[in-house]
Image: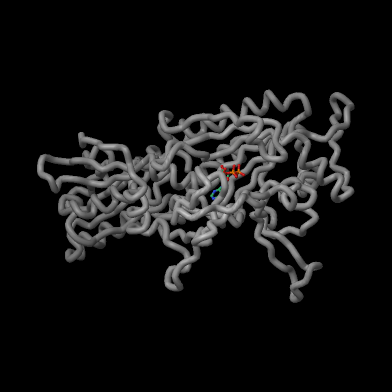
Amino acid sequence: MAGEERAVSMDQVVSLAKRRGFVYGSNEIYGGLSGFWDYGPLGVELKQNIKRAWWRAMVQMRDNVVGLDSSIIAPPAVFAASGHLQNFNDPLVECEKCKRRFRDDDVESDVCPSCGGHLSPPRQFNTMFQTHVGPVADDASVAYLRPETAQGTFVNYRNVLQTTPHKVPFGIAQIGKSFRNEITTGNFIFRCREFEQMELEFFVKPGTDDEWFDYWRKERFRWWTQDMGIRAENVRIRDHEKSELSHYSKQTSDIEYAYPFGTKELEGIADRTDFDLKAHIAGSGADLDYFDEESRERFVPYVIEPAAGLERSFLVVLLDAYAEEQTGTKPGDRRTVLKLGPRLAPYKVAVFPLMANRPALVEKARSVYDALRPYFTVAWDDIGNVGKRYRRQDEIGTPWAITVDFETLENNTVTVRDRDSMEQDRHDVDSLLHLFLERLGPL
Ligand code: ATP
């Protein structure tokens, strides 16, 4: 068994992510745009797999949660009601010498971390992106890019209640892009200006919110550490002090991860009370009361919100899976391996013909590849020797690799090599689909 060394650095993971096409800088050929990132062929697969895992746990497997996809741009009235126009501010300080800007809570003294110049007193900066809808850019056409998916859920709350049989307690889940004009971005994809959120708004009877808050706080920790396989020693729950709470929150707990740059938020769970629904009742005049048929009571539900960021999830999955290992006694016997759970791995299986210049091997390998592809993602690799191909697949986290060799042509068996143990077994070609479907479980 290979000797594993941990304590991963950001440089190692960023370099792998860029080298292997998980993440690219955005608009690089034009010099880039800070706070924006593009996801390459492997990144897009990993993102989809994370979203699928979240959706499965939060929507598909629950009787009382349904999905929604609301628009990204909304009129000012929505954000005036929600409080974002007035309160969604970050305190900004500016260096009087080099004019660089920082979030006040990111700098420890009144001296610029970049040039040592004096920093201005903090002023409030609204982090919503503004745009205009329609051909004329005037005050009447102002609209905003949403800073969270939640408001799109609240404005659709009545639609969902009226078009589904659900009763409180029930939830509406949404995965989608959000935008924040962050003052400082950084730590790779940890803080960006365009990002994706996976948010659930769970509507409950007032008075039962403490219980539900506690349920979701524990359930989300369980999901990260069990379903997603993130090492429990790297994750913790931190309850917010009263002074840290957002304008809408009664209580908040963060699920935090031990990133190489410090232990910071991965997901937030907030008790938003009836703040948002009441604000939209006042703002729109719509009737968003709920009539509880059992107790014959009318009330505005409270909302418990588990909100995770997809980019931070992506970063955590990579950091937690990354390892460099000594595989033998020689100094060159090393490999980089992503120990991703099979459900998260961009490719589930790789198929290699032992030699690329033997048509019989290539043809047989191609038939194995084609037989598996309809069921899950399969990589094809015929470049270089098989050892190199294993290393390439290890680096992108492919759990299993199949090699079609000369013995295959004689007895229809192939080798299946396991990424983590590096052991190889022979299996009949006709048994492969069943073997992998069983190992993968439901996708
Ligand atoms: P932070 O304190 O780090 O700015 P936040 O408390 O403002 O985060 P929330 O409003 O609770 O974040 O948003 C829920 C989740 O959305 C966060 O836990 C995070 O995963 C993600 N998120 C928020 N802002 C960003 C961002 N700028 N870039 C990437 N992900 C983000």
Residue 62 pos. (x, y %): 63, 35
Q: How is the image coloured?
A: one colour
Query: In the orientation shown, which residue stands out farthest toward the left?
Result: 330
Ligand 1 found in image quarter: top right
Q: Quick one: 413 or 250, which is closer to the camera?
A: 250
Which corner quadrant of the image does residue 9 belong to? top left
Q: Residue at x 21, y 35 (%)?
A: 3
Give the answer, above or below, for where 421 lies relative to 42. Answer: above
Residue 159 pos. (x, y %): 79, 48
Which corner quadrant of the image does residue 307 belong to? top right
Q: Residue at x 66, y 56 (%)?
A: 128
Residue 123 pos. (x, y %): 65, 52
Q: Residue at x 86, y 24 (%)?
A: 295
Is residue 343 visible to us here? no
Give the answer, above or below, for where 39 lies relative to 337. Answer: below
Q: Quick one: 138 or 14, which is closer to the camera?
A: 138
Q: Quadrant of the N terminus?
A: top left
